[in-house]
Image (cartoon, helix red, strand yellow):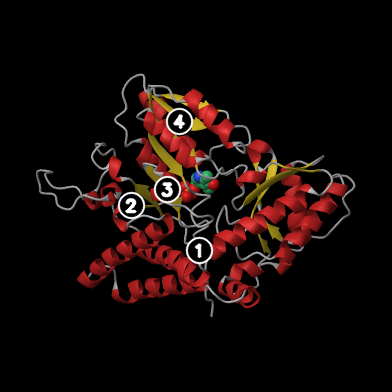
Amino acid sequence: MVGPFLPDDEKMPALREALPSTAAGIYLNTGTCGPIPRETAHAMAEAEAWELRTGRADRNYWEDSLERRAEARAAVAAVLGTGPNRIALTHATSDGMNIATWAVDWRDGDRVVTTSLEHPGLLAPLRALRDRRGVELAIADIEMGGDPAAVLAALDRAITPRTRLVALSHVTWATGARLPIREIVELAHGRDALVAVDGAQSAGAMHVSMEDLGPDFYAVPAQKWLLGPDGIGAVYCAESVMDRPRLAFAGWASFESMDLAAEGELWPDARRFEIAGFHQPSVLGFARSAAWLAMYVGLPWAYERIARLAGEAVTMLAEVPGVEVLTPSGGVSGLVTFRIAGWKAAAALRELEQRTLCIARTVPPLDAIRISVGFFNTEGELRRFRDGVALVAENTPETMPHRPRMEVLRGGVD
Ligand SMILES: Cc1ncc(COP(=O)(O)O)c(C=O)c1O
């Protein structure tokens, strides 16, 4: 049984046993999708079976589904350091960024500001905004994102009096830099712009508090550091945005009541940003995973371990001749991005996958490899991965010793 206060030598095996896919290889890609806890998978399977047996249409199911949604909002609220009434469920981080983008009553000549290290989940809604409304899209160049003063200075130059929204990540997907959100919020609010934060790489990976940071929107996914299922997420909506926007999207779930003349009351809280139903087993799974993290793993323990191990990964990789670490040393979250001299990232990662059984990804715009260091990873795994990187770095694609594919070893865990 996992418990937050077990000593690490007992806790780690218990945690890894509770996260079966951590045995499928060196699991270094939580930034794409985290390992699902056994308990979450069981709860979801039970919910599916119950739906099959009893259907999804009776009053009990409906009432239960409302409770499950409330539970999921509360579990996310606890991670984000806010109240459940500030949380709307969504289907993805990208959904939340769309909600934020269209929460502004855009006028001709307006401007939206973002940074040069953003994910398409954030850039795509801004691009749609530019294409549809002619809003000027300004991209502040923040290089690798590692110098908070330089990031602030770049945003200071970009945020003009016509800027209505600043949309950016807390942790950049490409380099793992942690951006100074609180200071950016102060800067933007001082110029009457809203701030929408993409929290895909921060929520569940590091301490995050809406009260401390003060954004207007903060969008998160279930499937990454919160270890939940795909196709579900949430967005924090500050009190400040409740009266401002006329809704761009709405559905029956946005309203507390509505009559046949379309008159009725919006929910007074963030639920007004929800539109319709969700896959109920996923709602349950989201709540279970977030609660499992908080209650059994312990969030402070997980955050401390992620930061420490990711810091060690930066140091280990930086010591390998031929490796260039792009992750700024001061801004460590769980992501570590690096290049290997003489190698295209995709080719180097293929070698690493075969030789170390690592699960990681590339960052195509930087032609780099990105690993995500989770609390469930071990120092031994990081050393094995580093040894693989050292072997690749000692070679070129032409001199790499031949190695047969080892995929047969994957996928044997229940
Ligand atoms: C920073 C960032 N934003 C957004 C996304 C997209 O997330 P989602 O699939 O939840 O929309 C990702 C990852 O895929 C990401 O890393």
Mark 3 or 4: in front is 3
3 or 2: mark nearer the eye: 3
Q: Where is residue 410 in the image (x, y as percent from the top left)?
A: 68, 67
Between the residue at mark 3 and the residue at mark 4, the CA separation in whole angstroms equals 30 Å
Task: Locate residue 228, reporting x and y percent.
Answer: 47, 62
Instruction: State left or right for residue 18 relative to residue 407.
Output: left
Q: Picture quarter containing residue 404?
A: bottom right
Q: Which amino acid does label 2 sit on?
A: Ala
Q: Residue at x 62, y 39 (%)?
A: 146
Q: In front here: 200 or 263?
A: 200
Q: What residue type is labelled 1?
A: Leu
Sequence-first disc among 3 and 2: 2
Residue 258 locus on image (x, y percent):
13, 49
Q: Mark 4 points at which residue?
A: 127
> Quadrant location of the C terminus?
bottom right
Q: Residue 88 carries which label?
A: 2
Q: Nearer the viewer, residue 409 or 248?
A: 248
Per the rendering, the mark at residue 122 is none
